[in-house]
Image: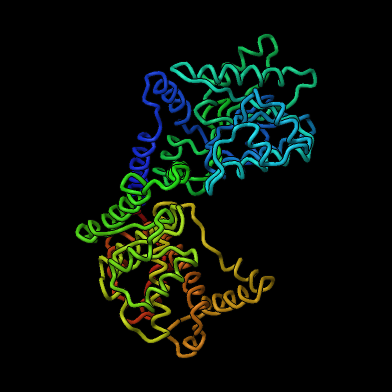
Amino acid sequence: MQTSLDLQQALFRHQQRQIDALVAGASKPFKAYEARYRRASRAVRRVISLSELHRRVAAADVVHVGDYHTLRFAQRAFVDLLKHALQTGRRVVVALEFVEGRHQHAVDEYLAGRLTDRAFLDEIGHPYSGAFDIWPHFKPIFELARRRRLELVAIDKRATGPKSLPQRDAYAARRIADAARADDRPLVLVLMGQYHVAPAHLPAEVTRALGAHARRQLVVFQNPEGAWWKLARAGQVDAVDAIELSDDVLALFNASPIVCQRTFLDYCEAEAGDAPVDDGGLAGTVRTLAREIARLTGVRIKDQLARLEVLTPNELDVLDRLRRRGGFSKRELGELEQHVLSGQSAFIPRANAIWLSGFSLNHAAEEAAHFVRHCAVGSAMEQSRRRTDAFWARCVEEAIAFFGSKLVNPRRTCTSLTTWASHFLHDTPGLKATAAFVLALSSAPDVRHPEVRRLVPTGLEQFTAVTHAMGYLLGAALFEAHRTGRLDRADLRALFTDPLPEGAAAYERWSKRARALPASNPKAA
């Protein structure tokens, strides 16, 4: 799946440049520290199961789990490891970088229920509480510790200067060693930044701090970039949950490196308050996505890209800017306003603008794909059609958008037919109705049949919900066909340049292409 990998790596490089510009980490000591982490995290000895990983954790005494602070999946994975550790029957101690050691008293008071969340965060000097605050990611760890009466040790230390990283490691190591050398030999689970838990850093310091009290240590990285790209090049990354890098180093996978980066960039942009999002931020990411999707599909976008405007929640004058760019009527502006307020992102062709309702990488990729699609077919994207053909054409448009997001984030999933069946049986009336349409239409042998036309929803809300669902299902199937070599670069161009003159026929055509049997020697584009 070389085309998808090319796009992911281009975006990774683009976002890494953004992060480098934000983080003052260019000193020689930092670069050396980073290099030791990269050397320790790029090997792939063998793929292992999650059950084996849990067994290895249970057999250790100190487990250093790498954290990506802004990625909620990283803290969720730690909670999962913690729950499995509790099943061993051993006393479990939690050690967190989230709080400085000097605030241990506040941690104890909070776990005892004598401090509210707000009072606790104020006490420890937690710096930020906006939409991308990381406290909600960490709170489940504290809640589990409170519920199970676990010892929770604060291990961070404020430090600056060229020796700040080893100083923080040494301080954390002393706190961890104090807990680990207890006579009952507890299982200590540590959550600290990914670079810190490289074997030559924090684990080595813990060994020194323990002295004669030998303890078995294990490192568990999360989503290490070097190993992730190796697995991606081998076409394995989608199916791998964990790997062994060396005897005492394992890794978990729950997100791609670019998703990890994006969460950090989102945090930084949100933390900056009303700072404009320009080519150094999300707008630049969207343009990078559009360029890469255009390159993969052979669509020329240079002129339109130069005039593209990317609007985000940071802009308070979204409708005024759209009015100036698109010449919309009062009624059309009202509809745009309702769309903005609905919380859904959109590409608005007449204004040559993308509205992003949030900072989701998936949604940014979807709208970039919509933009490239419009560059390929122009007004055909919005041509007047009969209701049924409009419905199926919209399904294909949503499929193209979802396909674009899967190129960037192959782990993205859509609601399966099994889940839709569950919605139909157990959910609210509105979701049941959507599920009924999705299940009925998905089972149709040919959507061009006259009887199928009567199944197309008439109301705008259901029309939108069902086209999204059906489009995502088709997009996922097309991506799988691309991943396995059944859709090559020429097919991708055909998909993005298809004017869809008859929507039902186009949907049927691309559905058949997605279901086509693989060639005898499949090779990804």
Residue 112 falls in which quadrant of the image? top right
What residue appears at the point 45 percent right and 45 percent down from the top-left corner?
273
What residue appears at the point 38 percent right and 59 percent down from the top-left corner?
404
Q: Residue furthest bottom?
A: 450
What residue appears at the point 39 percent right and 54 percent down from the top-left corner?
407
What residue appears at the point 72 percent right and 21 percent down from the top-left corner?
179
* Residue 490, image x, y percentages: 27, 62
* Residue 444, image x, y percentages: 50, 80
Q: Viewer-proximal residue, 446 or 373?
A: 373
Classify residue 101 as left or right of residue 236. right
Judge whether residue 487 can be spotted in this image: yes
Up-down relation of residue 12 to residue 320 (above or below): above
Judge whether residue 262 can be spotted in this image: no
Up-down relation of residue 388 to residue 466 (above or below): below
Q: Viewer-proximal residue, 148 or 265?
A: 265
* Residue 440, image x, y percentages: 55, 79
* Residue 109, image x, y percentages: 75, 32
Classify residue 385 as left or right of residue 213. left
Up-down relation of residue 351 to residue 213 (above or below): below
Quadrant where the C terminus sits is bottom left
Q: Viewer-proximal residue, 486 or 63?
A: 63
Q: Residue furthest left?
A: 303
Up-down relation of residue 369 to residue 39 (above or below): below
Q: Count how many numbered circles sit on residues in the image.
A: 0
Classify residue 496 as left or right of residue 148. left
